[in-house]
Amino acid sequence: MSSLASLSTSPDIEKLQPAHHFRLLQDEHIRGRYHALEHLWGLPRGSVNLFTESNLIYVRADIAQLFWSQDIALAPATELMIKMRSFLESNEFAAHEGYQCSSCFGCLSLQEYEYKLTPTAEHGPPLYMLDSTGSELQKIEFPYDSLPAFKLDLYPFFATAHGGAAFLDKRSIHHPVYSRPLRSIHVFHCLPVPRWAYARRDGKEHLRIITRDDESDSDSESTVYSTHEGERVQSWIHGRSADESNSEGGRG
């Protein structure tokens, strides 16, 4: 199975940037919708942590830039997105009836899933993919239809939150097989949260599951790091080390 770290926008194998872990779903992608995500995912308020390893992908800096600017997205299998949409619809119905929402972990467990990389913009650069020997680059023309599927530890609820917001923002007509279900999932994330949901009990069992081995579960820390994300990615692209970027307050 191919790795996302094999992708770059550079045709020169000697100039490939190093790969690092990068947060796919960023604060700015879901600003104003945190509570809607928590509620519809069936999680206690304050438990969605964007620093969880289930929101990390391992990519080179130029590819991270495309994800950060929402020019590309990762779409799980269509059948999986249909299941997720049905889950969100069921939780939305439960909310209107005053019932407790089901946990997203009952819908999808934390495990590896297959994803297709899809553009969300109308135009984009060609991508280059290292072959299995790591010695040659294969050119992949936009809109990247020839790319294989990627098997990742990324949790599909993070991926669809990123991809749905991206397709809505870019209004791309590429890959309707992915854009339509992603948009339909995003619609649920934009719905208002019922007042009763704000009084839900704190469920530490869910918090532990979603944060796992993370360094932080603080909303304020997440916000602080988010404000530096663009600078961190730009520093990364220009060849500075991840440690240098982190020392300035950026982390992804």
Image (spheres, helix red, strand yellow):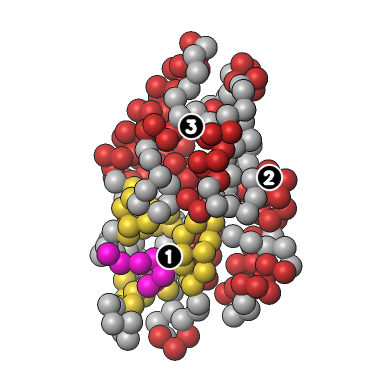
Kindly identify the amino acid type of the residue bearing the numbered disc 2: Ser
Q: Position of residue 175 (x, y in %)?
A: 31, 50
Between circles 1 and 2, the one closer to the viewer is: 2
Q: Pinpoint residue 226: horizontal percent, then vertical percent.
A: 66, 54
Inspect this view and state whether residue 219 appears: yes
Left-right relation of 184 to 36: left
Which residue type carries mark 1? Gly
Q: Is mark 2 on a helix, strand or loop?
A: loop
24 is within the stretch colored magenta: no
Amino acid found under the numbered disc labelled 3: Trp
- Magenta-colored span: 1-7
Q: Which residue is drawn at 46% across and 37% down?
A: 186
Lower position in the chain sequence, tag 1 or tag 2: 1
Q: Which residue is at a point 42% across and 39% down the rendered structure image?
A: 183
Residue 41 numbered mark, or none: 3
Rounded to the nearest angstrom, the CA distance separating label 1 from label 3 is: 32 Å
Residue 213, image x and y in percent?
55, 52
Q: Is mark 1 on a helix, strand or loop?
A: loop
Which is in the foreground here, disc 3 or disc 2?
A: 2
Residue to which mark 2 is pinned: 218
Identify the residue shown where x is 35% and y is 67%: 3
Spatial CA span between label 1 and label 2: 35 Å
On the rendered image, what quadrant is the C terminus found in?
Answer: bottom right
Quarter of the image where one finds residue 244:
bottom right
